[in-house]
């Protein structure tokens, strides 16, 4: 799945937990390399978890419910996808904690992280923003993670997730400011540029969106999907010839990708290159996933008009 779509955050989260409850796997790792091998394997899993949130800060976290709930501090039943229920369970836990810890600022960082993430997935954005902002404030103040509960991301990663929540909540100005702060602190975070471009596109701020797309390519020139993103933005901004050039620059990796083929069909049709558009749409229809109903219907209609 990752080979087909390196931005599938859920795939990385799945890798992080896939062996959590497989005792035979962990026994084998320990027998083969001792405690140090087990520690390395755990570090690799934690890296997968961080990668999942990097490529998609609001990836569907229900897959973590199949892992070790004690390790992640997640409420039971999360794997059903009922985020509102999971959020309510987290609220009940907070009530118990608050009887012992009267100041919310003193709640464990790990609890605030999962409470905020569950709130975001339950579309309770105000609570999510409050939790994530509090984590950033705490981490800035103590310059280290809570010693009792793990927060899986460094402070700039939490800032990145907060930006995504602000974006989903429709708070464009706050999202843009946070994404820019993320990039200032980590120029290699190309996905922050991808998300920033999406915010500008939503506001039809085409020059800023194109700039962010190009910055993402500069930060990670080896990912051809970034060229595809740039081509789509250029096409939406009506720079059709430049969109065609960007598609050509994707290289051979995406030549038979349905996303590439559909966009190429649209671009070539807009440029009046009907034969090329017909070929692209025809090939797209042979390989597009059945769930892409809108794109499939659109491609068929455009082919009918071409014929």
Image: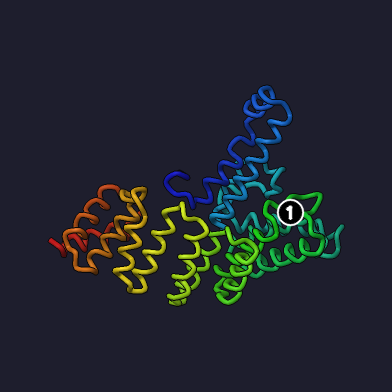
Q: Determine the residue positioned at 60% across, 65% down.
A: 183
Q: Secondary structure at mark 1?
A: helix
Looking at the rendering, in which quadrant would you find the C terminus?
A: bottom left
Number of numbered markers: 1
In the picture as drawn, the residue positioned furthest to the left comes out as 307
Q: Is residue 71 left or right of residue 265?
A: right
> What percent of the width, then of the height, locates residue 68?
67, 40
Q: Determine the residue positioned at 46% across, 65% down.
A: 214
Q: Is residue 19 left or right of residue 275?
A: right
Which residue is labeled 1 in the image?
A: 110
55 w.r.t. 274: above or below: above
> What percent of the width, then of the height, locates residue 211?
47, 70
Q: Determine the residue positioned at 65% across, 70% down.
A: 126
Q: Determine the residue positioned at 47% across, 45% down.
A: 2
> What percent of the width, then of the height, locates residue 302?
21, 63
Q: Is residue 288 left or right of residue 85?
A: left
> What percent of the width, then of the height, locates residue 94?
76, 58
Q: Quadrant of residue 56?
A: bottom right
269 w.r.t. 68: above or below: below
Q: Nearer the viewer, residue 78 or 139?
A: 139
Q: How is the image coloured?
A: rainbow
In the picture as drawn, the residue positioned furthest to the top comes out as 31
Q: Nearer the viewer, residue 167 or 123?
A: 167
Looking at the rendering, in which quadrant would you find the N terminus?
A: top left
Q: Nearer the viewer, residue 251 or 118?
A: 251
- Dot 1 alpha-carbon crowd within 10 angstroms: few under 14, some 14 to 19, many 20 or more: many
């Amino acid at each position: 799945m990752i080979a087909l779509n390196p931005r599938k955050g859920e795939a990385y989260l799945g890798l992080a937990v896939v062996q959590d409850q497989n005792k035979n796997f962990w026994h084998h790792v320990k027998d083969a390399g001792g405690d140090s091998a087990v520690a390395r394997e755990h570090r690799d899993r934690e890296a997968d978890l961080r990668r999942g949130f990097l490529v998609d800060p609001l990836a569907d976290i229900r897959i973590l419910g199949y892992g070790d709930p004690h390790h992640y501090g997640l409420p039971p039943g999360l794997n059903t996808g009922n985020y509102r229920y999971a959020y309510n369970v987290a609220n009940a836990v907070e009530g118990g904690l608050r009887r012992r810890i009267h100041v919310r600022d003193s709640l464990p960082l790990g609890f605030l992280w999962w409470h905020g993430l569950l709130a975001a997935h339950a579309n309770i954005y105000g609570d999510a923003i409050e939790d994530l902002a509090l984590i950033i404030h705490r981490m800035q103040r103590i310059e280290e993670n809570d010693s009792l509960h793990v927060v899986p991301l460094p402070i700039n990663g939490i800032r990145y997730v907060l930006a995504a929540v602000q974006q989903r909540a429709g708070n464009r100005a706050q999202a843009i400011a946070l994404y820019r702060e993320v990039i200032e602190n980590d120029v290699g975070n190309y996905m922050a540029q991808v998300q920033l471009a999406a915010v500008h596109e939503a506001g039809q701020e085409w020059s800023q969106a194109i700039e962010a797309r190009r910055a993402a390519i500069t930060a990670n020139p080896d990912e051809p999907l970034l060229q595809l993103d740039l081509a789509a933005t250029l096409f939406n901004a009506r720079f059709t010839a430049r969109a065609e050039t960007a598609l050509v620059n994707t290289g051979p990796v995406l030549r038979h990708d349905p996303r590439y083929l559909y966009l190429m069909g649209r671009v070539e049709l807009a440029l009046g290159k009907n034969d090329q558009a017909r070929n692209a749409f025809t090939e797209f229809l042979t390989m597009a996933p059945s769930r892409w109903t809108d794109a499939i219907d659109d491609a068929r209609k455009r082919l009918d008009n071409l014929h």
